[in-house]
Image (cartoon, rainbow, N blue to C red):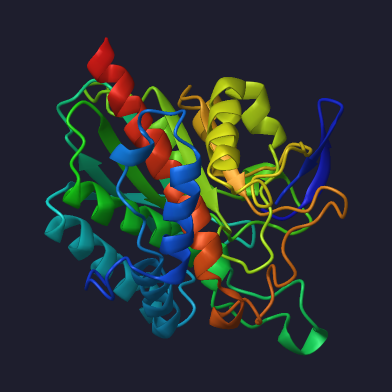
Amino acid sequence: MKKIFLLSSYILLIFTFTQCTAPNSADNKELQNNNQQNTVENFWNKTPSFNADSCYWYIKYQVQLGPRNPGSKAHEKSIEWLKKFFENSQLTTSLQKFPAATYDNQQWIGTNIIAQYQPELKNRILLCAHYDTRPFADRDTEKNKHTPILGANDGASGVAVIMSIVDAVQKSPLHNIGIDIVLFDLEDYGNPGGEAITWCLGAQYWSKNLSPTSIKPKEGILLDMVGDTNAVFPKEGISIRYHPVLVHEIWSIAQKAGFANYFIDESTNEITDDHLFINTYANIPCIDIIHYYPHQSDFFEHHHKVSDDMRNISKRTLLVVGQSILYYLYKQEEKSQLN
């Protein structure tokens, strides 16, 4: 998200489905070497490898569609493509349509994409991201300020990591953990000079309209801007406030895996993102893995610029994030087997 304002004495910063090459890239080999050096955790060798090659391709496909801002043809095509991916992966899939008014008085029908792995299980974890892109490059030069962005990192990367996690789970099934996936719409159409409530419209709707008969996830992980070459992921303020245990566990896992240069041991101010409303409206403890530079108090270099394209996407960063989440999921699977 993308705006700074004061809230309760805090400074609140607003803020494919075709399998590609096999998971034998140099990044995955390096990861396997890291794994051999970290044998303390029993779940280490039971976790499938994250395929950074196919993840990269999933981002590339979204970008090739064009800017996926609401009302665009690319937005419609991405909904169809993502829905088909989850259906082909044998997940229970649905589209949640919702009315929305953006800060500029435009009226929209948004679409949240929902998929469930083993929906019958009570032990559930939420994985989420936004798939829409910013309809204007408001942080760019004057010439580009009204140009929609491609959103390779800001939107497509989180979606692609979740897709590749689904691929891995299909190959090495979880038996005691259910996964709820939500890809939010209208996350990135907020007022750059306005309140937090102008952002994350899809997450706000989903969080307010949980089915009373559905099984609520025990916790959630939001992925936003997780593919940049120079990415770092600090411990974000809202995440620490609502679920410090999960923050500690994911960061500890990543650091044991050799990813400490990415999952840095620093905290940052609260960042308004989809997880704010998941925490406050849905009462699901949810953390945010998001690229942010604490000492610069800013997001990645190409944030809300037309330069947010494939040139800045790193397979290594995708691998670091995706593998860390897989480690966490399979650790939870092992814990459930011991109980």
Q: Which residue is farthest top?
A: 339
Residue 215 figure quarter: top left
Task: Tell me if residue 265 can be seen.
Answer: yes
Residue located 57% across and 80% down the image = 309
Q: Nearer the viewer, residue 222 or 312?
A: 312
**Residue 260 appears left or right of 107:** right
| Horizontal side, residue 224 vs residue 213: left or right | right
In the picture shown, does residue 309 fall above or below 226?
below
Is 38 positioned to the left or the right of 18 in the image?
right
Q: Toward which corner of the image does residue 299 lie, by quadrant?
A: bottom right
Q: How many marks?
A: 0
Residue 277: give x, y in percent of width and height. 55, 34
Q: Which residue occupies the foreground of this view, 137 or 256?
A: 256
Quadrant position of the C terminus in the picture = top left
Position of residue 276 relative to residue 157, above or below, is above
Position of residue 274 measured from the top left corner of the image (x, y, whole percent) = 54, 43
**Residue pictured at 87% horizontal, 50% vertical:** 295
201 or 94, which lies in front? 94
* Residue located 52% across and 54% down the image: 320
Question: In screen coordinates, is 310 left or right of 308?
Answer: left
Instruction: Judge whether residue 132 can be spotted in this image.
Output: no
Residue 220, position as x, y percentages in the image: 45, 33
Instruction: Give the residue furthest to the front.
Output: 37
